[in-house]
Image: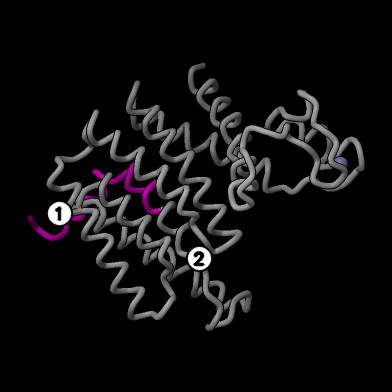
Amino acid sequence: MITILVFALGLLIGSFLNVCISRIPKRESIVFPHSHCPGCGRNLKAAELVPVLSFLVQRGKCRGCGGKIAWRYPLVELLTGVIFIVLYTRYAGIDFLLYAIFFSLMVIVFFIDFDHQIIPNRLILILLSYVLVWQITRPVVPWGEALLGGILGGCVFLILALISKGGMGGGDIKLVAVLGLLFGWRYILILMFLSFILGGVTGALLLAAGIKKRKDGIPFGPFLVLASFIVSAWGENILFWYLRLSGW
Ligand SMILES: [Zn+2]
C-alpha cells in the first residue's frame, strides 16, 4: 500500500519536474503562470494535470486544440515514480526524503542537459547548496572523504575537458565535483567509472546505428545522473563485489 503512495508521490513530483525542465532553460518562473498547452495557450484544468492518466484518457492530445502532447511528459512522470520506489526500497524515513529530493533535481539536470547540452549554473548552485546542507546536518560520508571526492571528481573531469578540447563541458565538471562532495572519494570513483561505461556504450551504439556522427557531441550529464542513481541504489553492493574480486 505504502509503495503505491510512494509511486503516486513520484508521479506528482514528476509532473512538477516537467514544468521545471521546460521553464528553467527559458529563465521563466516555475510557479507562474499556470500550466498551459504550448499549442493553444489554454490553461489546463485539474483533471488534465493528473499525471500519466490524463495523457492516456486524452490519448495524448490537448482537449482544446487537439495538438499532440509530447510523450516525454508521462515518461518523466513514470520515471520519477520508479526512481522513488527504488529509493524507497533502499532508504527509510528522512534518508528516503533526502535522496528523493536530490534525484528530483537530478531528473531536471538529466533532461535539460539532454535537450540543450547545458547544465544551468542556477541548477548547479541549488544542487551544491542542497548537498552542503545535507552533509552538514546528516553526513553521508566523513567530511575528509567528501572534500577529497569533490576535488578528485572535479580534477578528473577538468583534465578530461582539457584533453578532449570541449568534449566535456564546464557543467559536467561542476556537477561531478558536487557529486564527489556527496558520495566521497570511494563512490565518486565508481560513479565516474560507471558514467564512462554508460557514455561509451551509448556513444558506440548511436554511432553504429548512424544516429550520431563521430564529430557530434553527446551531453554527458545524463550519464552522470544515471551513474549516481546506480551508486545510490546499489553502490555498497558494487563496492563489496569489487573488493572481493580484487582480493582485498
Ligand atoms: Zn492546446
Q: Residue furthest left?
A: 248
- Left of 205 or right of it: where is 185? left
Residue 130 x/y as whole percent: 36, 38
- The answer to which quarter of the image holds residue 97 is top left
Give me the residue at 63% from left, 74% from top: 211
In the rendered image, the vertical position of residue 215 relative to residue 140, given as above or below: below
Q: Is residue 185 above or below residue 234?
A: below
For the C terminus, give its image quadrant: bottom left
**Which residue is painted at 42% across and 50% down in the image?**
124
Disc assigned to residue 79: none
Residue linked to disc 1:
243
Q: Which residue is mark 2?
A: 219
* Pointer 2 local density, CA inside 10 Å: few below 14, some 14–19, many at least 20: many
Q: Tell me the residue at 38%/53% (across/down).
A: 227
* Residue type (three-letter) at the residue carrying disc 1: Leu
Residue 12: quarter of image: top right
In the visual, does 179 lie left or right of 206? left
Label 2, secondary structure: give it: loop
Front residue of 50/180: it is 180
